[in-house]
Amino acid sequence: MLRIAALTILATSLSGCASVYVMSHVPTATMARLSAMTVADIDPRELLVVARLAKGLEPQPGGVKVTLGLSAPQGGRRTETFALEAVPTSAEMVAVAKFQRLDEGLFVYQLSATDMLRLSRIVAETAQASGSKSISISAGVDACHRGPLTEGALPSTTILKANASGYFILAQDLDIRRLVSASELAAKVPACVS
């Protein structure tokens, strides 16, 4: 599966292995905002991911994920991954309407109730631990397609809401065709099952 529009930024610095192409689609304001983010800035009840995908594409079931990289108490880092679930259509659509574009679908995802509790525990544990509170965060979407893939660009944008301060774009208008070769596209972005 192709994880599209994925972005990982450490609170202190950008990851050295990030693709130049992907990084060129990250707004400067996003880099500044993420560089200042700590674990305490994440509100599990507010954590949402919005995927804006080219017409005919949609997230696969279980395909929207957020991964957090956290400082471990003994040093080093630990990773936690959360699979998100679709938000009921009307619940957040008004808030994200400004991101809508003609001929692109908009999909909103949130943590499950179980993962809200798990992330709340992680935030509390990290707040009590000594040492660095830095965080890396990535959001990704495994996409599938309905009908034939269109010719030309297949733009993908990933938007994050980490707390009540609102939404911000992680990566904007990444062309899926530039991320994978033509021969890999069908395997990486398969036909939707249901």
Image: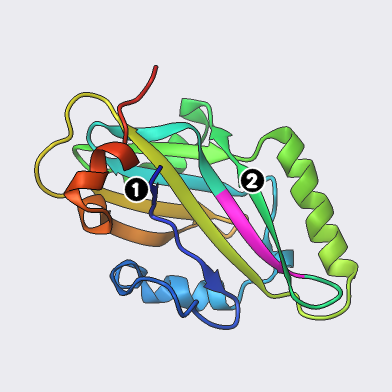
Estimate the x, y position of residue 88 in percent, counting from the top left: 52, 26
Farthest residue in the left direction?
Answer: 151
Farthest residue in the front direction?
Answer: 183
- Location of mark 2 (residue): 82
Residue 123: quarter of image: bottom right
Residue 70: in magenta span: yes
Q: Residue at x 43, y 32 (%)?
A: 60
Estimate the x, y position of residue 61 in percent, counting from the top left: 49, 29
Quarter of the image with the N terminus is top left
Name the secondary structure under disc 2.
strand
Q: Residue at x 20, y 24 (%)?
A: 147
Three-letter residue code for mark 1: Lys
Dot 1: within a 10 Å radius of its alpha carbon, few (fewer than 14), some, or many (20 or more) residues?
A: few
Farthest residue in the top direction?
Answer: 194
Name the secondary structure under disc 1.
helix
Q: Tell me the tag on residue 47.
A: none
Dot 2: within a 10 Å radius of its alpha carbon, few (fewer than 14), some, or many (20 or more) residues?
A: some
- Location of mark 1 (residue): 98
Q: Depth check: 176 or 96 in front? A: 176
Estimate the x, y position of residue 19 in percent, counting from the top left: 35, 71
Q: Depth check: 78 or 137 in front? A: 78
The residue stretch that appears in magenta: 66-71
Q: CA distance from mark 1 to mark 2?
A: 26 Å
85 vs 21, left or right, is right
Sooner in the amino-acid sequence: mark 1 or mark 2: 2
Vertical relation: 177 (above or below) 16: above
156 vs 164, left or right, is left
